[in-house]
Image (cartoon, rainbow, N blue to C red):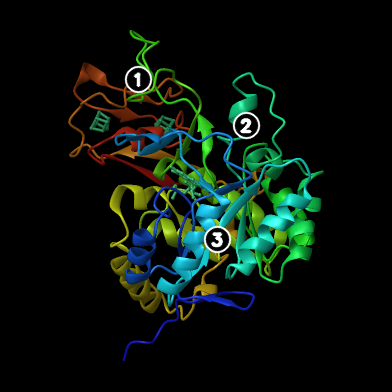
Amino acid sequence: MTQAVDLSVKMGNLTLRNPFIVGAGPTMKNLEQIRKAEDNGWGGASIKLAIDPAPYINLPPRYRWLRRQKIHIFTAETRLTADQSLKLLEQARKVAKEMVIFPTITYDGEEHEGWAVLAKRFEDAGAQAIELNMCCPNMSFNLTTTGEPSTKATGATLGSDLKQLPGVVKLIVDAVNIPIIVKLTPEGGKIAQAAYASIQAGAAAVGSTANRLGIPDIDIYEPMKSIYRLQDQITLGCLSGPWIRPLALRDTYEMRYYLGKEPFVIGSGGVTDLQSAVRQIMVGADAIWICTETIIRGFDWMPSLLEELEKYMQEMGYRKIGDFRDLLLKNIASAAELRIHEGYAVVEKERCNACGLCWNIGHCSAITHPGDTTTVIDPDECTGCSTCIDLCVRGAITMVKK
Ligand SMILES: Cc1cc2nc3c(=O)[nH]c(=O)nc-3n(C[C@H](O)[C@H](O)[C@H](O)COP(=O)(O)O)c2cc1C
Ligand code: SF4
Ligand code: SF4
């Protein structure tokens, strides 16, 4: 008999039926999207960012999906007003019987008290929890980096300001009786400290990774040409999607490492399938925001991911998500602690077709190719670095331990 597994996760008194939350973004802006997410079994849904007083940058969306590099980039985006988001929240609460709805908010007024007033309005409208957007680099860092000094205490600017952040979080936590989730930015390099400060200030949960700012490849023969359609300039864009996974894993790992076992941590960045989801949990995530994949594929792939996750857990003997959360944590060693074995690479002559792919490795003095017909590795010169193995498409090189 196969063992039953429990996919649910608990954040304080709130239970999510599974760890997968639609991340705030363009796929959580209307009731139809919320209905689809509910029907396809998502655990939660974070409503698109609402900015109060009014969104200070609000343009029609301009996105690129750079398929080969697996990069999603956006430069312009439409946000919601508080009133739009409140209305959607009220409707969503009626539609979502199983799924938890998280409104996400940012306050952009003069006094920080405005954050608390805004949060209270969402609590009164039926929010089960509120996400604070302390992560969006587009509305904050992208003003400073591109020349304009930013006076905005919003998004990634506030999320990376360790002096202001705890005070704002505490103000909001004290103003409402529902859990507060702080969605943080890795921009600025202090995500673990910001997570710690947020939890100390009373947040119920913290999370990462929103998008990273960057400039994707441009055509050097037409450098002034925008890669964006219907947009003139290049601009720094918000990057997300699979390319971001290694950085996103690091963010979750650092938060979990710094915070210890208890606090609820939500990871995100490039999660698209079983492997990428389980890895996030293994480095410390209790739940996962997924955005880009819903932009590309909608919502109806969730049932098969849930099925795969159940099967995986049964196979591995895990009964609940907590059984494998943090599993990788103890195996992540510091650079100084690495145990390195001595060894060298060897070529399997029968497999090598002398294609030459491994003959010009810049740092390698072990490989020779007599008569250009065969490949020879001198074990005494080989440092065991591995580059040749990764270059050989025929699998002709293996490593042996001394
Ligand atoms: C077009 C777009 C808009 C987004 N808007 C928001 C937003 O309004 N609020 C927010 O907290 N995160 C926003 N995000 C960030 C996502 O929720 C998510 O955290 C991030 O994209 C990383 O996950 P992913 O690789 O699965 O997309 C947005 C992402 C994209 C691509
Ligand atoms: S493992 Fe590194 S040093 Fe050794 S043969 Fe391959 S590329 Fe050269
Ligand atoms: S890359 Fe592989 S197949 Fe090509 S020369 Fe090197 S060992 Fe031979």
Quadrant holding ligand 2?
top left
Which residue is pictured at 20% across the width and 26% down the height?
A: 355
Q: State the CA–CA distance, disc 3 to disc 1.
A: 36 Å
* Quarter of image, res 61: top left
Can you give x and y, in whole percent of width and height, for residue 114 in the image? 73, 50
* Mark 1: amino acid: Asn
Q: How many marks?
A: 3
Say which label, 3 or 1, has the lower sequence index: 3
Residue 141: mark in rendering: 2
* Image vertical order of residue 17 relative to residue 180, above or below: below
Q: State the CA–CA distance, disc 2 to disc 1.
A: 42 Å
* Mark 3: amino acid: Leu
Which residue is pictured at 35% across the width and 53% down the height?
A: 294
* Mark 2: amino acid: Phe
Q: State the CA–CA distance, disc 3 to disc 2.
A: 32 Å
Which residue is pictured at 55% across the width and 68% down the height?
A: 325
Q: Nearer the viewer, mark 3 or mark 2?
A: 2
Can you give x and y, in whole percent of width and height, for residue 148 in the image? 65, 21
Residue 135: mark in rendering: none
Residue 360: mark in rendering: 1
Q: Left or right of 286: which side holds 299? A: left
Q: Left or right of 121: which side holds 61? A: left
Q: Nearer the viewer, mark 2 or mark 1?
A: 2
- Label 2: state its secondary structure: helix
Dots 3, 2 in contact, CB < 8 A: no
Disc 3 target residue: 328
